[in-house]
Image (cartoon, rainbow, N blue to C red):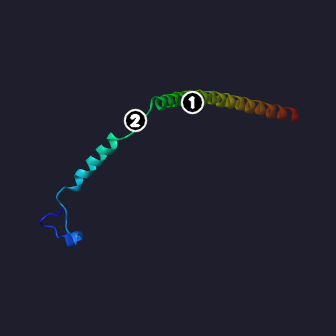
């Protein structure tokens, strides 16, 4: 079908501005969103299982981080005790040398 103002021999230079291309975007989005495949029940169950596993892993990480913090504090206390003993040892060595 040819429009009265269109020259069929020279269609490349004709400017078709009857419908703004802006309206094509919502139409295409609506088309793709309405045709999207919905997840199956088994896929939803797998997702819930994965979420539960991730939550359990996060709780485990928090627990291990707290344990690590406690061990680091204990290690620092033991290092301080060792430094105290070394200082005491050096003092005794100096006293015995005199």
Mark found first going from the N terminus, 2 or 1:
2
One can see residue 98 in this view: no
Q: Nearer the viewer, residue 45 or 58?
A: 45
Residue 9 image position (x, y, % from top left): 21, 73
| In this picture, residue 64 sits left or right of residue 48 | right
Q: Label 1, secondary structure: give it.
A: helix
Q: Which of marks 2 and 1 is in front?
A: 2
| In this picture, residue 96 sits left or right of residue 77 | right
All told, the count of numbered labels is 2
**Residue at which label 2 appears:** 38
Q: How crowded is mark 2: few (under 14 residues within 10 Å), some or many (20 or more)?
A: few
Q: Distance between the residues labelled 2 and 1?
A: 28 Å
In the picture, the quarter occupied by the N terminus is bottom left
| In this picture, residue 49 sits left or right of residue 30 | right
Q: Which of 41 and 61 is in front in this view?
A: 41
| Residue at x 66%, y 29% (from the top left corner) | 71
| In this picture, residue 82 sits left or right of residue 97 | left
Residue 47 image position (x, y, % from top left): 49, 31
Q: Label 2, secondary structure: give it.
A: loop
| Residue at x 80%, y 35% (from the top left corner) | 90
**Residue at which label 1 appears:** 57
Residue 93 image position (x, y, % from top left): 84, 34
Residue sitting farthest toward the left: 4
């Amino acid at each position: 079908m040819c429009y009265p103002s269109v020259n069929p021999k020279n269609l490349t230079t004709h400017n078709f501005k009857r419908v703004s291309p802006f309206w094509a975007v919502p139409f295409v989005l609506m088309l793709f969103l309405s045709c999207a495949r919905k997840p199956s029940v088994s896929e939803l169950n797998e997702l819930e299982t994965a979420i539960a596993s991730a939550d359990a892993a996060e709780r485990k990480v928090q627990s291990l981080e707290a344990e690590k913090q406690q061990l680091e504090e204990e290690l620092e206390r033991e290092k301080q005790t060792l430094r105290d003993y070394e200082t005491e040892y050096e003092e005794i060595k100096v006293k015995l040398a005199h």
